[in-house]
């Protein structure tokens, strides 16, 4: 029995849910439905004999699922239509004249109406919407696109209103949903960049201020247009995006266009191999071109950023710093931020001024952003460290490691000598997390965590790489010799920055944890490492935001429970 039968058989005896706009659904046994990945192959297989019957009549024909199109002389098109109506129902294909359009040049209009009289086919010289894109005169194309843009402008305004109360959901809806609506039109229609000016105005004047507040510096618009991995928000400038998308689409689909124009109903292995090779090469060239353009745009945007903010921009444009921004707001995984947290996170990302925070800290110092992240009053610095520590332990447990311990005490020193005078030698010394099974089943690894303030002068004066290297080396000089000689184990310093980056050693450690997690759960490695990055990113981000807004004063008298006997009170 062919292996395809098992796949095909899933569509025969079972019903599927067709969801309606109001949340309800109906049960269907019609087989493949809209949105099904198998729809296109099923249509191709079932319509192949019909296409073969029609191929000799016209110069050109094309079917995409159940949407058929052809081109040729009026006489041949009429013959093609008649045969389609005759043979189509036998294959389950029922042409509908009222839904079919014949597009002709003005000089052929009267003749076309005469030839297709009585068929119900709509004859026009203006244009037609085909597969979601306009074909026809420049006026028809402009009218079609303008109507779409007006609708998208209304949707952007609606999303802007939502962003005032749910900015994280609104941003996710824009970046993963709404912004994808105009991509297809951009990729299939040329010379429409200027028609997207109203949409850009709605985005710049309504949506972005709803996320970050009004009166933003003008240079940040080009920064926001960058991908999130390059330090932006992925909110493209739509007029220029339209021209770039059409150019990239034309280049990427050139091999497919060539194959369609050949009008072959079947291709041999050599032609199929050449098509696959050409397609891969074309797509690879497009990716390279896009990355080159994005790199140029990043350099241009960076040139407009004030000198004292470029160090921060280097951090937020590094790998991992934007993980939280591209995540869906899933409450069960702890990926949800309230409106103030999301707003503050964006202000922190772009070093914009915070509103409604005290001018002076309870410790007596000026309450700058740098001071908020460093002040020990209130315990927020320790909270930041301890949450990363506990999360790391949980990740190791989920990955299947054994003997996972938080704050394990090291064995006492008994005469050992070490290479560094800075090595910690107190018998009461502890590290943050230890576990077995990270590198090998029985060997133990010890980790120590540090989260440094990227805005602190001691860190801000160095490059990002040098700063991480310095902090890692401090941890190594303090503990590595002792762990190796006394514990007979390995040591890994896990260093993070307040912008969400992790050091090279931490990268290696959590990649290994992702491998173990992937092996245990069956998820792919890429999904596992992204899941770990997201959890670490949100854990770090939330504790940083708490340290900015968290209360540090003393406005009430503490009740000291340690000095009281609960039995006497109760």
Image: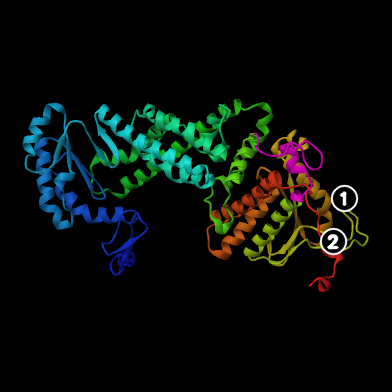
Do callouts 1 and 2 mark residues in contact (Cβ within 8 Å)? no
Horizontally, residue 370 falls left or right of residue 167, namely right
Q: Can residue 226 be seen from the camera position used here?
A: no
Instruction: Give the secondary structure at mark 2.
Output: helix
Nearest to N terminus: mark 1 or mark 2: 1
Magenta highlight range: 353-381
Write down the quadrant of residue 259 in the picture: top left
Residue receiving disc 2: 486
Write down the quadrant of residue 125 in the picture: top left
The residues bearing labels 1 and 2 have C-alpha atoms spaced at a distance of: 13 Å
- Nearer-the-camera pick, 550 or 108: 550
Verify whether residue 418 appears in magenta.
no
* Residue occupying the point 16% across, 29% down: 105
Q: Percent position (x, y) of residue 552?
A: 76, 47
Write down the quadrant of residue 136 in the picture: top left
Horizontally, residue 209 falls left or right of residue 248, namely right
- Nearer-the-camera pick, 267 or 337: 337
Scheme of colours in the image:
rainbow
Q: Percent position (x, y) of residue 137?
A: 24, 28
Verify whether residue 373 appears in magenta.
yes
* Residue occupying the point 56% across, 35% down: 213
Main SS, magenta region, reads loop
- Nearer-the-camera pick, 257 or 347: 347
* Residue occupying the point 56% across, 32% down: 214
Instruction: Give the secondary structure at mark 1.
Output: loop
- Nearer-the-camera pick, 505 or 36: 36
* Residue occupying the point 6% across, 42% down: 118
Q: Is residue 352 above or below residue 405?
A: above
* Residue that protrudes farthest toward the front in the picture: 569
Horizontally, residue 33 falls left or right of residue 423, namely left
Q: Which mark is residue 419?
A: 1
């Amino acid at each position: 029995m062919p292996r395809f039968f098992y796949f095909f058989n899933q569509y025969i005896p079972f019903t599927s849910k067709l969801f309606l706009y109001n949340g309800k659904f109906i049960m269907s046994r019609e087989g493949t439905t809209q949105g099904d990945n198998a729809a296109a192959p099923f249509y191709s297989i079932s319509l192949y004999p019909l296409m073969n019957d029609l191929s000799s009549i016209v110069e050109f024909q094309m079917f995409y699922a159940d949407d058929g199109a052809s081109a040729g002389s009026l006489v041949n098109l009429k013959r093609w239509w008649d045969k389609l109506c005759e043979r189509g129902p036998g294959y389950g294909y029922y042409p509908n004249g009222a839904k079919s359009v014949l597009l002709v040049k003005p000089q052929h209009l009267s003749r076309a109406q005469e030839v297709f009289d009585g068929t119900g086919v709509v004859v026009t010289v203006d244009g037609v919407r085909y597969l979601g894109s306009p074909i026809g005169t420049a006026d028809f194309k402009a009218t079609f696109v303008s109507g779409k843009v007006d609708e998208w402008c209304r949707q952007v305004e609606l999303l802007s209103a939502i962003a005032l109360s749910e900015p994280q959901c609104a941003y996710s809806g824009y970046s993963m949903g709404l912004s994808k609506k105009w991509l297809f039109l951009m990729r299939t229609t040329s010379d429409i960049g200027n028609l997207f000016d109203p949409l850009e105005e709605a985005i710049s004047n309504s949506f972005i201020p709803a996320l970050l507040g009004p009166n933003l510096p003008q240079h940040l618009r080009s920064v926001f247009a960058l991908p999130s991995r390059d330090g932006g928000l992925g909110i493209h400038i739509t007029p220029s995006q339209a021209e770039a998308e059409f150019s990239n689409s034309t280049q990427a689909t050139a091999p497919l266009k060539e194959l369609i124009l050949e009008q072959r109903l079947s291709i041999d292995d050599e032609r199929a191999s050449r098509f696959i090779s050409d397609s891969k090469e074309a797509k690879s060239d497009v990716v390279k071109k896009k990355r080159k353009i994005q790199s140029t745009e990043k350099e241009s945007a960076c040139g407009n950023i004030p000198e004292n903010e470029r160090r921060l921009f280097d951090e937020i444009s590094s790998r991992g710093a934007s993980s939280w921004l591209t995540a869906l707001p899933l409450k069960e995984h702890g990926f949800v931020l309230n409106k103030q947290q999301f707003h503050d996170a964006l202000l922190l990302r772009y070093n914009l001024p915070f509103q409604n925070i005290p001018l002076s800290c309870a410790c007596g110092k000026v309450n700058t952003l740098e001071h908020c992240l460093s002040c020990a009053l209130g315990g927020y610095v320790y909270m930041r460290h301890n949450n990363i520590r506990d999360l790391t332990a949980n990740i190791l447990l989920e990955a299947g490691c054994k003997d996972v311990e938080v704050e394990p005490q090291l064995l006492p020193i008994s005469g050992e000598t070490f290479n560094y005078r800075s090595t910690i030698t107190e018998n009461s010394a502890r590290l943050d997390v230890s576990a077995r099974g990270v590198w090998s089943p029985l060997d133990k690894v010890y980790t120590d965590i540090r989260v440094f303030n990227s805005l602190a002068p001691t860190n801000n004066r160095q490059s990002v790489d040098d700063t991480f290297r310095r902090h890692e080396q401090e941890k190594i000089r303090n503990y590595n010799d002792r762990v190796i000689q006394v514990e007979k184990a390995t040591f890994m310093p896990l260093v993070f920055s307040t912008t969400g980056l992790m050091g090279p050693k931490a990268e290696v450690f959590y990649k290994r944890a992702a491998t173990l997690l992937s092996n245990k759960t069956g998820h792919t490695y890429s999904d596992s490492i992204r899941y770990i990055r997201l959890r670490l990113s949100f854990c770090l981000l939330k504790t940083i935001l708490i340290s900015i807004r968290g209360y540090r004063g003393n406005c009430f008298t503490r009740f000291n429970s340690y000095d009281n006997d609960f039995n006497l009170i109760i």
